[in-house]
Amino acid sequence: QVQLVESGGGLVQPGGSLRLSCATSGSIFRFSTMAWYRQAPGKERELVATITSAGSTVYVDSVKGRFTISRDNAKNTLYLQMNSLKPADTAVYYCNFLVDSLKRSWGQGTQVTVSS
């Protein structure tokens, strides 16, 4: 069973930066499109960014130019570099496989709080 463990969240001031990590297990990671999601209080979970096995990326408009999704296939690890953070970015961030057939159960995620 493939497991996903998010880390790197925390409290930062507006304009600050944070780097999230998602450690995975299983060789299937190297061949799969991965994604970061987030869920703010009182809102539905939303897709933030995706990255294919070859490194092609897609971002939701609200984070474009500020967030960078990347992966290290040798380490089975997914990353999300977040710069110029805004209070609207406050949410619990989750990683998962993009395709529904590979989705793992949602874990604890990692809390990102942007506040002055």
Image (cartoon, rainbow, N blue to C red):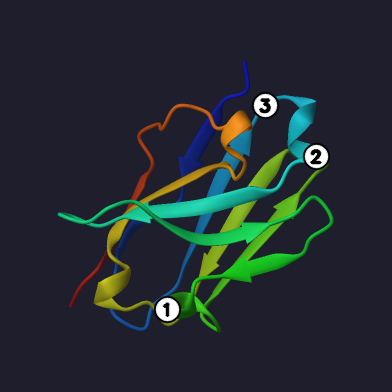
What's under tag 1, amino acid-wise? Ser
- In screen coordinates, is 79 left or right of 45? right
Discs 3/2, front:
2
Discs 2/1, front:
1
Quadrant of the rendered structure where residue 22 is? top right
Labels 3 & 1 near each other (Cβ < 8 A):
no
Residue at 73% from the left image edge and 36% from the top image edge: 29
Task: Name the disc covering residue 62, or none.
Answer: 1
Foreground residue among 90 and 98: 98
Residue 112 can be seen in this image: no
Q: Secondary structure at mark 1?
A: helix
Neighbours of disc 2 within 10 Å: few (<14), some (14-19), many (20+): some
Task: Name the disc covering residue 25, or none.
Answer: 3
Q: Is residue 44 above or below residue 114?
A: above
Residue 65 point in image, percent of width and height: 55, 84
Q: Which residue is mark 2?
A: 30
Q: Secondary structure at mark 3?
A: loop
Residue at the top extreme, as displayed: 1
Indicate which disc, 3 or 2, sits on the residue closer to the N terminus.
3
Discs 3/1, front:
1
Residue at 79% from the left image edge and 60% from the top image edge: 55
What's under tag 2, amino acid-wise? Arg
Neighbours of disc 3 within 10 Å: few (<14), some (14-19), many (20+): some
